[in-house]
Amino acid sequence: GVEIGLWTESNLLPRKGVKALLQRDLTKEVRDAGVRVLKTDVAWVGPGYSFGLRGVTDAANIMTYYGNNARPYIISCDGRAGTQRYATIWTGDQTGGEWEYIRFHIPTFIGASLSGQPNITSDVDGIFGGKNTPVFVREYQWKTYTPMMLNMDGWGSNEKYPHALGEPATSINRTYMKMKSELIPYTYSIAREAVDGKPMIRAMFLEDEANEFTMGTATRYQYMYGPSLLVAPIYQNTAADAEGNDVRH
């Protein structure tokens, strides 16, 4: 019953002279196989802005028309003005297993949202590196409160599935994945607001502009996920109390 999405470096529709391995027919995939998700990749970046924007636009139109007005979900590695109408962007192939991976992604997500791209994500714990249980768990936790969780497994030498590192990571990750599902109605609501209002991931000054504290760098590692949830991820190896809770300001 799972409807899969397919990754592409090639044209969306058949073209003469293209090797069979790179051929695809997105119309047939949508109409006959029920595909509703597409992940574009490197071949959609090189030729430039208009090429990438046309690609995600064409994919969205095909999924809507041949998918009985289905809502498409497209993930692209490139995004400029206009991309937000058709695709989520993700931050590319990264190395996880390090606190730095979490640290720099928090302001990256905030900055993308301020730039008019509310649908932003990155691979959970990267696609390379890994096998660092605290970082692995913190990744699943904080990305619960982001628009999308993207798990890219199979390219690196280490698995990134939520159960890959065993207990207690498996149970903790399961709890947060369930929370992610429970938040779907809330996420839908703030996604709708992001069409012509505030983004889903909100810099603190968007919700508390009267507070001068939010206008500087002091809050660059926290944000509001919609109007009701304050998210302040653990992004470094902080001290912990006897029960494993991080001690911080």
Image: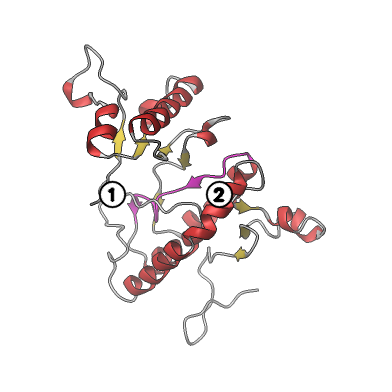
Point out the residue furthest to the top here: 16
Q: Which residues are magenta?
A: 115-129
Tell me if I can see residue 106 in this picture: no
Q: How is the image coloured?
A: secondary structure
Pinpoint residue 128: horizontal percent, then vertical percent.
Answer: 33, 50
| 68 or 109, nearer to the observer | 68
**Does the magenta portion include 117?**
yes
Corner quadrant of residue 96: bottom left
Pinpoint residue 161: horizontal percent, then vertical percent.
Answer: 30, 59
Identify the residue at image location x=30%, y=32%.
8
Tell me if I can see residue 154 in this picture: yes
Which image quarter is the C terminus in? bottom right
Cα gap from disc 2 to disc 1, whole angstroms = 32 Å
| 81 or 110, nearer to the observer | 81
Number of the label disc, if any, that sits on residue 191: 2
Pinpoint residue 123: horizontal percent, then vertical percent.
Answer: 40, 50
Q: What's the residue type where badge 2 is placed?
A: Ala
As drawn, is 69 to the left or to the right of 195? Answer: left
Number of the label disc, if any, that sits on residue 249: none
Q: Look at the picture and state if 175 lies above or below 143.
A: below
As drawn, is 186 to the left or to the right of 52? Answer: right
Main SS, magenta region, reads loop
Identify the residue at image location x=52%, y=56%.
187
Q: What's the residue type where badge 1 is placed?
A: Gly
| 181 or 168, nearer to the observer | 181
| 81 or 3, nearer to the observer | 3
Give the residue at mark 1. Answer: 156
As drawn, is 209 to the left or to the right of 179? Answer: right
